[in-house]
Image: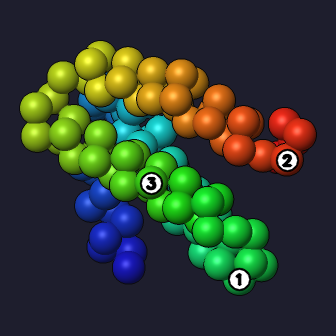
Amino acid sequence: MKKILTRVYKTYINPCLDFRVRLFNMLAIGGTIISFAMAVVGIFINIGIVNITVSLFLMVLSFTLFMILCRIGRHQICLTERIYCWHKRICPAAYLRSERGTL
């Protein structure tokens, strides 16, 4: 496990990388882990299929953008797409699907 974490650190969060690259990598890795954790917790506490589906969708979105970034290396486009998807599509949809606008 330590070898895997060291490899991930050296590859994606290395201080030698540009700040934008490290920032996006941290956001994508964190978003993937948090979304997965929220889906698992949602399953255990029976929060509803819509919230679980949204969490899994966000996990796939974060991981997909992360893989795209690793392949093409165009950080600004991936970061802009992530921000656009989150703030313009997912947050309003989650707010409107909730009961009386409260999550």
Q: Can you give x and y, in whole percent of width and height, for residue 41 in the image?
A: 69, 73
Mark 1 Cα-neighbour bin, 10 Å: few <14, some 14–19, many ≥20: few
Residue matched to label 1: 44
Classify mark 2: helix, strand or loop.
loop
Q: Nearer the viewer, residue 97 or 26?
A: 97
The residue lying at 77 percent from left, 78 percent from top is 45
Residue 89 marker: none
Mark 2 Cα-neighbour bin, 10 Å: few <14, some 14–19, many ≥20: few
Q: Quadrant of the N terminus?
A: bottom left
Q: Are marks 3 and 2 in contact (CB under 8 Å)?
A: no
Q: Can you give x and y, in whole percent of width and height, for residue 27 in the image?
A: 47, 39
Residue matched to label 3: 57
**Image height check: is 78 above or below 35?**
above
Q: Nearer the viewer, residue 5 or 85?
A: 85
The residue lying at 45 percent from left, 21 percent from top is 84
Q: Which amino acid, by three-letter code, is at mark 1?
A: Phe
Q: Give the farthest residue toward the left.
A: 72
Classify mark 1: helix, strand or loop.
helix
State the separation of the CA atoms marked 3 and 1.
18 Å
The mark nearer the N terminus, 3 or 1, is 1
Q: Quadrant of residue 39?
A: bottom right
Q: Is residue 47 visible?
A: yes
**Image height check: is 38 above or below 57?**
below
Mark 3 Cα-neighbour bin, 10 Å: few <14, some 14–19, many ≥20: some
Residue matched to label 2: 99
Q: Is residue 64 left or right of residue 52?
A: left
Q: Is residue 3 left or right of residue 85?
A: left
The mark nearer the N terminus, 2 or 1, is 1
Number of the front mark, 2 or 1: 2
Q: Can you give x and y, in whole percent of width and height, for residue 92 in the image?
A: 65, 29
State the separation of the CA atoms marked 2 and 1.
21 Å
**Image height check: is 74 above or below 102?**
above
